[in-house]
Image (spheres, rainbow, N blue to C red):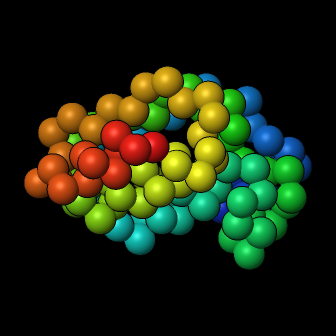
Amino acid sequence: LNSLCAAIARAPGPLRVEVLNLSENSLSHSEIRALSHVFGVASFPTIVSCPNAGIPHLRVLNLRECGLSDGAVEVIAESMGKGERPKLEELDLERNSFEGRCLRSLGGA
């Protein structure tokens, strides 16, 4: 995941990726935060070295069976609430470890 985030951050411009499938990868809260930093366009200039980098065209994000906790899902909801995924249509969180406290955050995003 670190390599993916670094590659996205080094891209000369926004990537035209529309579907990203990270299912069946064990992802920690900090890894989700790092990934969240490269989703938007220049939302986090200290992480994203190129001001035009990111994957703003992402429509589908599959995070099935990643062992996500409530905290990790809240990070996703927080960045969605900031408008960093304006084109996201589908978020697959099936079969994760969260208990459900994060669902209110997702509903508000």
Residue 101 visible: yes
In the displayed structure image, the side of residue 95 where residue 83 appears, left or right: right
Horizontal and vertical percent position of residue 66: 26, 49
In the displayed structure image, the side of residue 95 where residue 45 appears, left or right: right
**Displayed quadrant of residue 95:** top left
**Displayed quadrant of residue 75:** bottom left
Count of numbered marks: 0
**Displayed quadrant of residue 23:** top left
- Residue drawn at x 67%, y 49% is 40
Q: Is residue 64 above or below residue 31?
A: above
- Residue drawn at x 69%, y 38% is 56
Q: Nearer the viewer, residue 7 or 30?
A: 30
Horizontal and vertical percent position of residue 17: 65, 31
Horizontal and vertical percent position of residue 59: 56, 26
In the displayed structure image, the side of residue 66 where residue 62 appears, left or right: right
Residue 25 visible: no
Q: Residue furthest bottom?
A: 46
- Residue drawn at x 33%, y 32% is 92
- Residue drawn at x 22%, y 42% is 65
Horizontal and vertical percent position of residue 80: 52, 46
Which quadrant is home to the C terminus?
top left
Q: Is residue 93 above or below residue 4?
A: above
Q: Is residue 97 above or below residue 56?
A: below
